[in-house]
Amino acid sequence: MVLLYVDGQKKMFPTTATTVGDVLSRSHVTLAQGDLVQPSADTVMSGGQFNINVYRARPVVVVDGLHTYHILSAYQSPRLLALAAGLTLYPEDTYRTGIITNIVQNDSIGEKVTVQRATPLDVQVDGGVRHLRTQSTTVGDALKTAGISLGLKDTVSVPLSTTIIPGMTVNITRVTEAVVTLTQTLPRPVHTITDPTMLKGQTVVQQAGADGQKTTTFRIHYQNGVETGREVLQVVSQTAPVPQVVAVGTKVIFAGSVEYWRPKVEAAAAQYGLDPNMMLRIMNCESHGNATEVSTFIINGQHPTGLFQFLPSTWTENGGTMDNILDGNAQIQIAAKIMAGPQGATPWQCK
């Protein structure tokens, strides 16, 4: 059974048609331009009672700014009528409907739909750009309608009462403040004193010292999340740093020269069965006979030292101490002992 509503009439009848289009054809219902049938003509009908509605098109004038469109359509919604005119629409656009009363001016009869376009504008806010369309006339109303709230200290690039111009850009600067308490470390100062009883080149930490701390409450100012300044509200606590005291030795043992040390070298060479001239060549190459020579080079974090430029670690591994590392006699004895060993003079590249 089909219940057909068309041209103000209601008809009920049985049919063997399988689609809505077949029913209309068998009922001699012709669809003109703009007519609308629900459901659509290609809809397959199911069993039981089936309702078909035919809506006849009527003339409609759609006005979009300076452009006017004459259409025939069965739609009732002003938005659907504007879409039927081929317009591109936006959610913020609104519509005004009415009946044409001045037939000569509009060159038509029937209904009239006027599209009231929303004004486009861009708002730079919160690290991005929001592309808005609004029916509001002022910047302040547009921001409120778009749900963009302003903080008490936020700034806007134009007054909120400014009339919106299509395509304008509005910049919003978020101005915020935060009260925070921060603790900072106050580095311990290093005080250096000289000690004439210590060999030159030696250092001893006599007092380790300690870092201080300062806890302060600040009011920090931000613009768009970037700190622009801070002010001190209160120093909560402060512990002064304790200086570190480092003693630096100034005692110098006679540096000498290659020839000065020759008798000592010859005696050590005879004791260990070595060639004294080889030892003197190495001494001259390494330090030119200066027993207090401290190289500016750093090897494994250490400065080579003395007549034979021992690393402090090598020096102590072979029986020396930091108290006699600048003692030329001790340097000659330890060098001779090493050279008499399995490695010979191999550890010294400078010969």
Image (cartoon, helix red, strand yellow):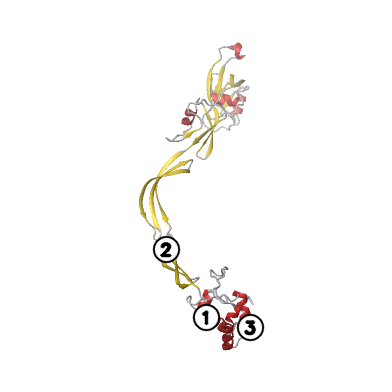
Q: Nearer the viewer, residue 154 or 76?
A: 154
Q: Which residue is mark 1?
A: 330
**In the rendering, at what x and y percent does residue 268 appear?**
56, 85
Amino acid under label 2?
Gln
Amino acid under label 3?
Asn
> Few, some or many C-alpha atoms within 10 Å of disc 2 (few <14, some 14-19, many ≥20)?
some
Name the front one of labels 1 and 2. Answer: 1
Q: Under tag 1, what secondary structure?
A: helix
Q: Nearer the viewer, residue 30 or 18?
A: 30
**Cα distance in 3D space between marks 2 and 3:** 47 Å
Seen at 58% across and 80% down, the residue is 260
Q: Which residue is mark 2?
A: 244
Examine the rendering and report whether any part of residue 54 can be seen: yes
Q: Are marks 1 and 3 in contact (CB under 8 Å)?
A: no
**Cα distance in 3D space between marks 1 and 2:** 32 Å
**Cα distance in 3D space between marks 1 and 3:** 18 Å
Q: Are marks 1 and 2 in contact (CB under 8 Å)?
A: no
